[in-house]
Amino acid sequence: MDKEFQADGIFPLTSEAAVALLKKIQDGDKSALAILYDKTSPLLFGLVLRTLGNRALAEEALLDVYTHIWRHAASYDPRLLPLEWMTAIARARAVAKMHWSKQDRKKRELSARGPDSPMTVAPEQQKIARDAMGSLAPTQREIIDWIYYSGLSCGEIAAQIGKPIGAIRTHARFGLSKLSDALRPLFEDGEDTTGGSR
């Protein structure tokens, strides 16, 4: 194995070496992934741990990061430094893990309340919102979910899911426009639809 790829920590991982490792990972080289992990996981683990504040969740998020890199190394954008790309993935995975952890906690709390507990204070408005989200094309819904729950920029989302940034922006724009039309009844504040004055 080339000297620059040794995983003993003596030789720092340059951007060029990281790009070469990503190319090897695209070809299914597991040893390249192991080296990339050895060289970068301390930094990325620190990032996800700071975001999540929970070691067990951070370990799960870190596993998600390298699983994503293994499966989507071909989506690496050479305009970014490899560490920038990996950091964007780590940040997105940590935020997603935080969101799903909160969702699981809410589900457990609702389940503990029992079936007779009120589930919502505004069922009609929630139905309108659910129907609006359901009316979106799957890709539009995925992008809107990423924007809402992760707080990532379109460029960071593109790096995370391996789609062109232009496509992310287009899906977001059309999706938000469609949502705006569908949710308009929630913001019309009871306007009189009969044509008469109030």
Image: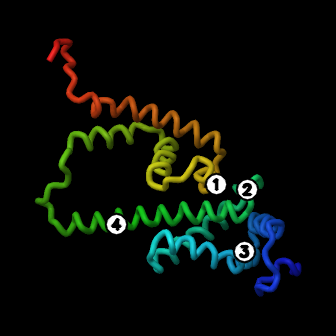
Q: Dot 3 lies on which element?
A: helix
* Quadrant in which the C terminus is drawn: top left
The number of numbered badges drawn on the structure is: 4
Q: How crowded is mark 4: few (under 14 residues within 10 Å), some or many (20 or more)?
A: few
- N-term mark: 2 or 1: 2
CA separation, marks 3 and 1?
Answer: 18 Å
- N-term mark: 2 or 4: 2
Q: Label 1: which residue?
A: 159
Q: Residue furthest top?
A: 196
CA separation, marks 4 and 3?
Answer: 32 Å
In the rendered structure, which amino acid carries the disc numbered 3? Leu
- N-term mark: 1 or 4: 4
Which quarter of the picture shows residue 193? top left
Instruction: Tell me: 168 left or right of 185.
Output: right
Q: Label 2: which residue?
A: 80
- Residue 63 screen position, x and y as percent: 57, 73
Q: Which residue is drawn at 46% across and 32% down?
A: 177
- N-term mark: 4 or 3: 3
Q: Dot 4 lies on which element?
A: helix
Q: Label 4: which residue?
A: 104
Are the residues tagged 2 and 1 within 8 Å (C-beta)? yes
- N-term mark: 3 or 2: 3
